[in-house]
Image (spheres, coloured by chain):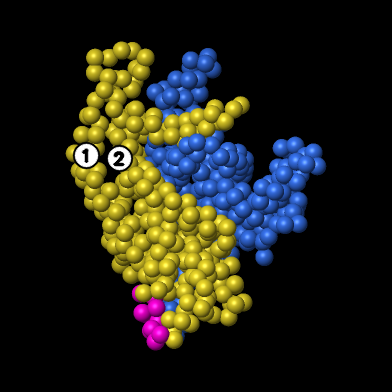
Chain colours: A yellow, B blue
């Protein structure tokens, strides 16, 4: 097989299912049931109208996910930046051991933590609060964030900090004027990966949030799916899938570079 | 001073990763359900004995292992092919790299709903295809023989881009002159793959393998939305069973036992996979440890 065919197959495999959703979302119900019969009304926007006029309207979930995503990312970076810096300033063996533990935590299937985290939410009364979700999200993305940012700190020449110290800059000033600007590419990669994780996270959002106006996008989608198994309004589902995918497709297209560099620098430097 | 920078992150990590494990271990030796009024009462090893005799647990464990083994295996093979394709130079490569990443970025539940429509009987495209091809309607999501394949398919679709990206990062670290030297000795593409690419890629394969094995062993979102564990719980995973036990049967003690057992198993599987990979792929003299300590 030549390369053109292979690339075509790859694109078909990657995008086909998504494009099928786009196609479905514009088809009228009759056309979905009998695709090979010609219909007067084949194309329609009715599915989008029904999804956007539902109660609560679909954009509500997008806004909720956006709120959770941004707050989690912010909290995660706030904690991970100092920790990543400090990891280079502790004894070498201890820091190597910490990094190994962080790799282990990053590999851990976090789904299994849902029960303990649910108990925590009950004990601290954190259920049904969107912003409270950023606590577990920031915590679960700490390992990856610290590892990625620590790599960035490692790449800075050590003389840099000595020079800044001689200039009399305090630790905060060094962070503000030297480290933050210099590691901003790694910070951007980390931020986007954390945002993606928080936006897509399902099991914890499922157990922490039950109020239907506070659901994040993944839980809202699953709830739509669970509502009825036999009479399934697939046109509306497809419209919801497309609307739910658009923000992420845009995110990937715009931030492709930092996403790839974040994932690969995590891999290359372990 | 340094310790104050580390402390907040360390505390959060302890609360979220370490405390739960101790909590699960403790709860697994307690009865804590609706029957006890959701109060933990020590019950010795009763939960663990129940686990050993719980046929549904063993069935779910087998299904989870089948799911993880088949989907991670397919993912790695496919990811290696994609990475090799995307490593070559050709026009439009960067655009294809970006587009191929999209499945990975979408929320699992969103596309799980999409797959439910694609595998739908009788209106989905797969069903149309099998009818036109003369195989007839397969009732994919309703047939225990096919439903699990659908879950593997959807999982491979979503997670292959991630694995491909990791392997691609590895391929880019291999210097081209190694290949040229072997070609001069008369090695063909297959020998290059066996003697250079795979050995030098081993740390990256290991990373992708361990990460994907652990994550697919805990598969939850995809199965819950795509099949709900059905038909007749033939696609139910361990994480889903633990979830039912906690939130539907309100039996926190037994749910903790299942989770604790899964944790031990996944650690074991990761160690076995690690050793297995060292045996399977020969060591290259220039191979450097990435997470092979």
Q: Residue furthest right?
A: B185
Region in magenta: A167-176
Quarter of the rendering occupied by the C terminus of chain A: bottom right
Question: Residue drawn at (47%, 48%), measured in percent from left and top?
Answer: B220
The quadrant in which residue A197 appears is: bottom left
- Image position, residue A189 (x, y; %): 43, 58
The quadrant in which residue B40 appears is: bottom left
Which secondary structure lies at badge 2?
A: helix
Say which residue label 1 marks: A52
Question: Residue drawn at (38%, 68%), measured in percent from left and top?
Answer: A181
Q: Earlier in the sequence, mark 1 or mark 2?
A: 1
- Image position, residue A210 (x, y; %): 30, 53
- Image position, residue A91 (x, y; %): 58, 80
Q: Tell me if residue B73 comes above or below residue B211 in the rendering.
A: above
Which secondary structure lies at badge 1?
A: helix
Q: Tell me if residue B287 comes above or below residue A41 in the rendering.
A: below
**Label 1: how many Cα within 10 Å (few below 14, some 14–19, many 20+):** some
Q: Are marks 1 and 2 in contact (CB under 8 Å)?
A: yes
């Amino acid at each position: 097989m030549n390369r053109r065919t292979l690339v075509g197959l790859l694109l078909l495999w990657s995008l086909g299912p998504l494009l099928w959703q786009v196609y479905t979302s514009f088809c009228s119900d009759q056309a979905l049931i009998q695709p090979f019969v010609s219909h007067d009304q084949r194309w329609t926007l009715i599915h989008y109208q029904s999804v956007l006029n539902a109660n609560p309207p679909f954009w509500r979930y997008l806004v909720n996910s956006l709120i959770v995503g941004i707050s989690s990312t912010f909290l995660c970076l706030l904690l991970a930046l100092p920790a990543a810096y400090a990891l280079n300033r502790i004894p070498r063996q201890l820091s190597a051991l910490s990094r190994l533990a962080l790799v282990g935590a990053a590999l851990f299937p976090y789904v299994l933590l849902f029960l303990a985290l649910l108990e925590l939410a009950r004990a601290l009364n954190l259920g049904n609060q969107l912003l409270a979700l950023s606590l577990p999200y920031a915590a679960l993305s700490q390992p990856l964030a610290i590892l990625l940012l620590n790599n960035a700190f490692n790449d800075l020449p050590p003389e840099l900090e000595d020079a800044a110290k001689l200039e009399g800059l305090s630790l905060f000033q060094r962070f503000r004027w030297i480290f933050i600007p210099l590691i901003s590419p790694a910070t951007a990669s980390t931020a986007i990966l954390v945002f993606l994780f928080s936006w897509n996270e399902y099991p914890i959002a499922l157990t922490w949030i039950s109020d239907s106006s506070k659901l994040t996008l993944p839980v809202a989608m699953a709830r739509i799916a669970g509502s009825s198994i036999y009479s399934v309004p697939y046109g509306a589902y497809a419209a919801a899938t497309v609307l739910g995918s658009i923000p992420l497709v845009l995110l990937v297209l715009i931030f492709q570079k930092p996403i790839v560099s974040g994932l690969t620098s995590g891999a290359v430097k372990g | 001073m340094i310790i104050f920078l580390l402390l907040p992150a360390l505390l959060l990590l302890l609360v979220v990763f370490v405390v739960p494990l101790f909590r699960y271990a403790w709860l697994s030796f307690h009865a804590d359900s609706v029957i006890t009024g959701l109060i933990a009462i020590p019950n010795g090893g009763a939960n663990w004995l129940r686990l050993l005799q719980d046929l549904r647990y063993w069935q779910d464990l087998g299904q989870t292992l089948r799911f993880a083994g088949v989907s991670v295996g397919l993912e790695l093979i496919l990811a290696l092919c994609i990475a090799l394709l995307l490593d070559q130079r050709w026009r439009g490569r960067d655009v294809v790299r970006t587009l191929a990443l999209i499945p990975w970025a979408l929320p699992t539940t969103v596309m799980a709903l999409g797959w439910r429509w694609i595998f739908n009987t009788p209106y989905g495209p797969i069903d149309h295809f099998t009818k036109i091809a003369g195989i007839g309607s397969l009732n994919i999501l309703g047939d225990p023989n096919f439903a699990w394949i659908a879950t593997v398919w959807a999982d491979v679709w979503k997670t292959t881009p991630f694995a491909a990206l990791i392997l691609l990062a590895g391929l880019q670290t291999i210097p081209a002159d190694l290949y040229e030297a072997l070609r001069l000795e008369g090695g063909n593409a297959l020998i290059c793959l066996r003697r250079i690419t795979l050995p030098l890629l081993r740390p990256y394969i290991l990373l992708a393998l361990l990460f994907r094995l652990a994550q697919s062993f805990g598969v939850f979102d995809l199965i819950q939305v795509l099949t709900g564990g059905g038909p007749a719980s033939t696609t139910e995973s361990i994480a889903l069973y633990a979830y039912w036990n906690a939130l539907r049967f309100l039996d926190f003690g037994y749910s903790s036992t299942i989770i604790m057992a899964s944790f031990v198993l996944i650690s074991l599987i990761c160690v076995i996979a690690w050793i297995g990979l060292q045996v399977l792929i020969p060591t290259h003299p220039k191979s450097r440890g990435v997470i092979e300590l």
